[in-house]
Amino acid sequence: MNAVGTMSKQQIAENFDDLHQPLNKLQAITEAARCTYCYDAPCIKACPTGIDIPTFIHQIRTHNVQGAAKTILSENIMGGTCARACPTEVLCERACVRNHDQGKPVEIGLLQRFAVDDLMDNSDEHPFLRAPETGKQIAVIGAGPAGLSCAHRAALLGHTVTVFEAKPKAGGLNEYGLAAYKMVDDFAQKEVDFLLGIGGIDIRFGQRLGDNLDFASLQRDYDAVFLGVGLGNTNDLGLENESMAGVEDAIDFIEILRQAEDKSTLEVPEEVIVIGGGNTAIDAAVQAKRLGAEQVTLVYRRGEEQMSATDWEIDLARKNGVSIRLWSKPVSIEGQDAVTGMIFEHTALENGRLVGTGKTYQVPADKIYKAIGQKLSPTALTDLAIQNGKVVTDEHFRTNLPKVFAGGDCIASGEDLTVQAVEDGKRAAHAMGRCLFGIEVTEI
């Protein structure tokens, strides 16, 4: 049964407050002093965007905070979002040498946030200046992390960029797909506004491939095209009654939460099942619990060590009262007009293969959120080469279409992370400049 207003507006506000409280100046300088400024620092190698982490931390320590921000943003223009949502615990912070001699890494993510936020809050000027106009016109499809990163870098190189975005706001998953407590105070839009401060970028909303956009006209009208559409469709369970009322995609639930002006007015299911083992599943489960659901059960078909969610995220779910059921696969959805629960079958590994054991159990629920991965929407991409569900690109991010490049989650470039998408967009902008216009990038 769904209810409205099970928690007060104040309780909801507290539950969706900033997950990581930012450092103040004294805390930042004290934390920065823990960095040993390693030669050949492993944290740099662990960062997909290659930020010079020891240098920006040293700049914080010496009170050059805006210089630290420029060091970060020169490699990752969306360093503010990545400081909030990047899984630093399995990237740069896992590589930190302080894990070995002090048992705790330097708080790189919080230090990055401190520096970038300081610049965004206290500087009226964009930190980078555009190169002289090249006269080149670049089209970017998708205003998510990859597209915005590509647009910013292309504008920085002197090109004029038009971004085509299907939704009414820019930001992609940063705006629509991250848990509300990770991106408070409308930060995604603040970051978009900051990024656009470079100039030379125009965003057109309500523009969708296969609807009012097509590759033929884009290739005709622009000197280069970058595709950063992400993964638009979600995977299905393949069960009967999957379209029943109460069965929804977790990403849609997260978007509703992110766009709600007053979360205390949202309907709250009493018993929730979340199916999946990634960070999206964790985000949905934790937010359902913080919204007021009495029972939230996250179900995954394999063991905890196979979950793609980080250990930190899994621990967060448990601390928020989420029940995690492992080695279980969905068998059927129960209910008549609306969902009342699910039947799961216990699973096991047999000669390396996941198999059902024949033993089943039921979990009651009035809401089921599916978080079993996303996939490309192929209808608008029929002209592109697709392999294993991803757009095929070469080492220069070029697709099989002339002048069309791609990056982010829609290609197989690495982890499906915001920080990887930002790096793809940046490198693709360099590649199109080099491959099409003969522009070599040496430094920013």
Image: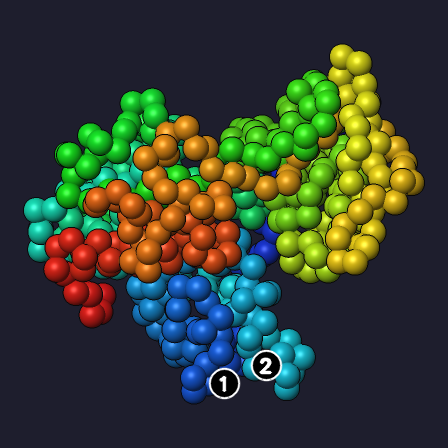
Q: Residue at x 21, y 45 (%)?
A: 403
Left of 424 or right of it: where is 16? right
Say which residue appears at 50% left-offset and 85% top-offset: 36
Give the amino acid at mark 1.
Thr
Residue under numbered circle 1: 36
Residue 341, compared with residue 421, is above or below; it is above
Q: Is residue 415 visible?
A: yes
Q: Give the left or right position of residue 385, taking residue 270 as reference.
A: left
Residue at 33%, 68% in the rendered image: 71
Q: Is residue 82 above or below residue 277?
A: below
Residue 299 point in image, percent of width and height = 77, 42
Disc 1 and disc 2 in contact, CB within 8 angstroms: yes
Chain-order first, disc 1 or disc 2 = 1
Amino acid type of the residue tagged 2 in the rendering:
Arg
> Would residue 257 be visible to someone looking at this image?
no
Disc 2 target residue: 98
**Between 290 and 310, which is closer to the camera in this rendering?**
310
Q: Residues within 10 Å of mark 2 (few under 14, many from 20)?
A: some
Residue 167 in the figure: left or right of residue 195? right
SS for callout 1: loop
Spatial CA distance of label 1 from label 2 is 8 Å
Mark 1 surroundings within 10 Å by alpha-carbon count, few (fewer than 14), some (14 through 19), many (20 or more): some
**Residue 374: quadrant of the picture:** top right
- Does residue 43 lie above or below 82 as drawn? below
> What SS does tag 2 mark?
helix
The image shows residue 105 at horizontal and vertical percentages of: 59, 75
Q: Colour mode?
A: rainbow
Work out which quarter of the rendered image holds the C terminus and state it: bottom left
Q: Residue at x 49, y 78 (%)?
A: 42
Q: Horizontal and vertical percent for residue 28?
A: 50, 70
Q: Is residue 163 above or below residue 31?
A: above
Coordinates of residue 379 in the picture (x, y in percent):
41, 28
